[in-house]
Image (cartoon, helix red, strand yellow):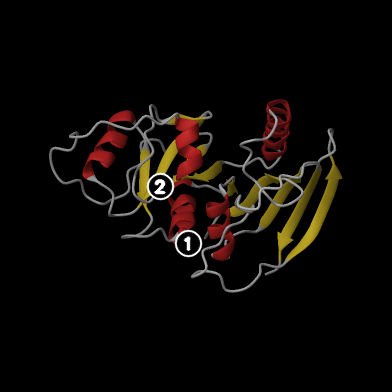
Amino acid sequence: MKPYVICHMMSSLDGHALTDGWDRPFKKAAGELYEKLAETFAFDAWVCGRVTMQEIAHDEGYPSGLATAPIPRTHHFADRDAAKYAISIDPHGKVGWKKNQALDSHIVEVVTQAVSDDYLAYLQSIGVSYVFGGKTEIDLHVVVELLASELGIKRLVVEGGPNVSGSFVAAGLVDEVSVLLLPLVDGRGDHPASFEIAPETWKQPAHLTLDSAEVQEGGGVWLRYKTVK
C-alpha cells in the first residue's frame, strides 16, 4: 500500500535544478508556472528535503532544553484531517519550524530514532506531526506506507531537492516524472543535476516512457513520463 508518487521539478536545458544565480524575473515566472502545473496533480501531500524545508521555514533554529524526560520513539500526529500535508525529510531533526503549517499544508517531519528529545519536544509544542522512518537512516518504503496507512495520502508529489528526488527514484517508488524544462542554459558544471543518487544506492538507470509534452508560455516545455515497471 503506497501513494501514487509524482516527482515534479523544473530544470535548465543542461539538467540543473537549483535556481540560485538565475535572473530574478525569470526565476519568479518559472516558479509560478511550476506551482501552477503542480496543482493539476490534485495531490494531498508534497515532500521536500531538509535544505529546501529550511528555506521555506526561514529557519533560525529551535530552543534547547524543552525535553524534561526521554520521549518515546512513536509516531505523533497532531492533525489527521488536513487538506494537504508538507512532508519534510529531515533525518536528524534540524528544521526550525515556527508553526505547524508550510504553504497552507500541515507539516509532518520524517526523522530517525536518533533524533534528539529536545527536537521532538519542540515539534510537539508547536503542533507539528512527526513519524520515524528508521533507526539511523530513512527507509522511504516505510515512510510512504506510513503516509498512506496513517494519513490516507493517495497522491504524493516529490518536489526536491535533487538528493530527495534521486532517493525516491533509486528506491523504485516513483510512478511518474514531471519536468518543466526551461529555456535556459545554467552552465555550472559543479551544480547538482535534477536527480542525485548516492553511489552506494545506484543500481541501474531508471527507464521511462513519454506520456505527454506541452509547450508552455515563455518557451518552456512540460514533459511527463511514466516509469517502466
Q: Is residue 87 visible?
A: no
**197 shown above or below 150:** below
Given contact means CB atoms under 8 Å apart, are the residues at marks 2 and 1 in contact?
no
Q: Position of residue 6 (x, y in %)?
A: 64, 51
Q: Position of residue 75 (x, y in %)?
A: 32, 48
Label 2 – label 1 distance at C-alpha: 16 Å
Report crowding for label 2: few under 14, some 14 to 19, many 20 or more residues within 10 A (C-alpha): many
Image check: 143 left or right of 179?
left
Kind of residue indicated by mark 1: His
**Which residue is painted at 68% across and 39% down in the image?**
38
Kind of residue indicated by mark 2: Asp
The residue lying toward the viewer, choosing from 116 and 100, is 116
Which residue corresponds to mark 1? 141
Image check: 108 left or right of 210?
left
Which residue corresponds to mark 2? 90
The residue lying toward the viewer, choosing from 145 and 38, is 38
